């Protein structure tokens, strides 16, 4: 039986060299659109080159190397997309340097006067709003006091997230922050809100650490300063987004590490203004709130209804949450998946105007920075609870394989 799987990450141990055989063993269920990850040594000749991966019949598979790997899974790797993988099956592939680069791929551009942009085949997939803080007016400051990412649909023609416009402009795109932050400087108590940023706080893009692009994924890693009311940096965030090209939609991996040189920084807030959130286009709030619904592991909600903690005490530690909303004349669904290693208790917020996410409490110290991971699946149309369950399972416990020479 084939069970729809929109994304699964398969980790394959051992080094893979040109013309090396890669062995993959299926799990307990049939799967589709499987991302197979193969660890590479830093000196591997495949790194940075177009890669050709084939099976015994000569069928080619989409593949790409990474020189650095992800923020939470560092190390060079090869990633291969398999259309299907049957339960208990054994698959052997050959990896080698390709004769030519693929015709369709992600690209990264950072032009003067424009937002940094990740494109796929010449059309936008994601934009990074990193405009420096402008305090020449209240309006200018409001537009530039924090950084965030815009997300587009898989055609590159519809911007699915909002910016600093319309109602509730403090919720923007793909964003991470906390509205109740406390710490001490020289023995004096300080408070900060890096969500609303109304008392001099801000988030600043300080540097770009990494960009990787290819036919299968694009990765973007940046360093962000968290500034308090006195404008001094009290914490530094390394934020990373990886966009995966998949047949039925796009998957975005969000990873963040928040560190501090202070003795302790307490991160707290409320479900609406803390944690990692997705905010859909302002058009949802303006025209389509009654068409929004939420799909949870406990069942599908009614259109125009929402569940929030603490009014609903059960709105905690969801394995996943899905929001289905309308932009233009089309329905889209975003599936929000927290990694099980993230801090608990995760308290959820849903808003029919197109925002959802969760937050938790955490105290960051120099020895214990905050590390979090989320996966956001984005597709046109609706999804099912079974598909969301499979997404969560693969994110939480990727299946291991083996590389053989």
Image (tube, rainbow, N blue to C red):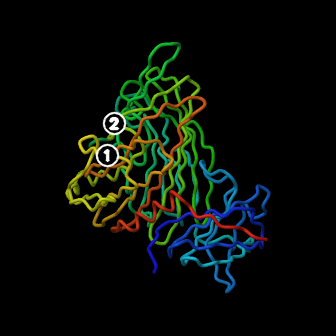
Residue at the image point whose x is 79% and y is 71% from the top: 405
Whether 94 is drawn above or below 222: the answer is below
Out of 366 and 298, give the one closest to the viewer.
Answer: 298
**Where does the image place residue 74, in percent across and percent down from the top left?**
65, 50
Mark 2: few/some/many CA within 10 Å (<14, 14-19, 20+): some
The numbered mark at residue 270 is: 2
Residue at the image point whose x is 56% and y is 71% from the top: 27
Q: Quadrant of residue 201?
A: top left
The numbered mark at residue 205 is: none
Residue occupied by mark 1: 349
Secondary structure category for the residue under label 1 = strand
**The residue positioned farthest toward the top in the image shown:** 187
Whether 138 is drawn above or below 100: the answer is above
Distance in Å between CA atoms under marks 2 and 1: 9 Å
Residue at the image point whose x is 59% and y is 26% from the top: 261
**Where does the image place residue 69, in percent across and percent down from the top left?**
65, 54
**Where does the image place residue 277, in percent across and percent down from the top left?**
39, 46
Q: Quadrant of residue 82?
A: bottom right
**Where does the image place residue 244, in percent across and percent down from the top left?**
53, 62
Residue at the image point whose x is 39% and y is 57% from the top: 159
Q: Are marks 2 and 1 in contact (CB under 8 Å)?
A: yes
Q: Earlier in the sequence, mark 2 or mark 1?
A: 2
Out of 235 and 315, give the one closest to the viewer.
Answer: 315
Out of 221 and 163, give the one closest to the viewer.
Answer: 221
Residue 188 shown left or right of residue 401 in the figure? left
Mark 1: few/some/many CA within 10 Å (<14, 14-19, 20+): many
Secondary structure category for the residue under label 2 = loop
């Amino acid at each position: 039986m084939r069970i729809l799987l929109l994304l699964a990450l398969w980790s394959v141990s051992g080094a893979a060299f040109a013309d090396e055989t890669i062995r993959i063993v299926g799990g307990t269920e049939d799967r589709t659109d499987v991302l197979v990850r193969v660890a590479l040594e830093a000196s591997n000749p495949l790194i940075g080159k177009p890669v050709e991966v084939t099976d015994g019949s000569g069928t080619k598979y989409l593949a790409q190397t990474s020189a650095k790997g992800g923020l939470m899974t560092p190390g060079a790797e090869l990633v291969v997309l398999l259309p299907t993988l049957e339960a208990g099956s054994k698959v052997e592939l050959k990896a080698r340097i390709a004769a030519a680069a693929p015709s369709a791929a992600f690209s990264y551009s950072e032009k003067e006067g424009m937002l940094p942009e990740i494109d796929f085949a010449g059309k936008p997939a994601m934009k990074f709003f990193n405009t420096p803080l402008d305090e020449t007016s209240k309006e200018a400051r409001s537009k530039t006091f924090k950084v965030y990412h815009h997300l587009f649909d898989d055609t590159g023609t519809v911007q699915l997230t909002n910016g600093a416009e319309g109602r509730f402009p403090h919720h923007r795109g793909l964003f991470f922050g906390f509205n109740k932050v406390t710490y001490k400087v020289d023995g004096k108590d300080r408070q900060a809100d890096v969500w609303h940023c109304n008392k001099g706080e801000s988030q600043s893009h300080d540097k770009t650490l990494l960009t990787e692009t290819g036919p299968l994924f694009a990765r973007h890693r940046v360093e962000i300063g968290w500034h308090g009311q006195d404008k001094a940096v009290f914490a530094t965030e390394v934020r990373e987004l990886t966009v995966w090209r998949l047949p039925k939609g796009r998957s975005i991996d969000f990873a963040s590490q928040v560190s501090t040189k202070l003795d302790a920084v307490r991160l707290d807030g409320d479900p609406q203004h803390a944690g990692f959130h997705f905010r859909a286009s302002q058009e949802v709030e303006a025209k389509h709130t009654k068409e929004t619904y939420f799909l949870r592991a406990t069942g599908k909600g009614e259109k125009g209804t929402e569940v929030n903690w603490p009014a609903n005490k059960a709105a905690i530690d969801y394995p996943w949450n899905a929001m289905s909303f309308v932009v233009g004349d089309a329905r889209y669904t975003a599936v929000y998946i927290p990694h099980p290693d993230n801090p608990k208790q995760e308290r959820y917020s849903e808003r029919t105007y197109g925002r959802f996410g969760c937050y938790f409490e955490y105290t960051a110290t120099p020895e214990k920075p905050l590390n979090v991971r989320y996966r956001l699946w984005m597709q046109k149309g609706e999804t099912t609870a079974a598909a969301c369950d499979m997404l969560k399972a693969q994110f939480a416990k990727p299946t291991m394989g083996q590389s053989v020479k």
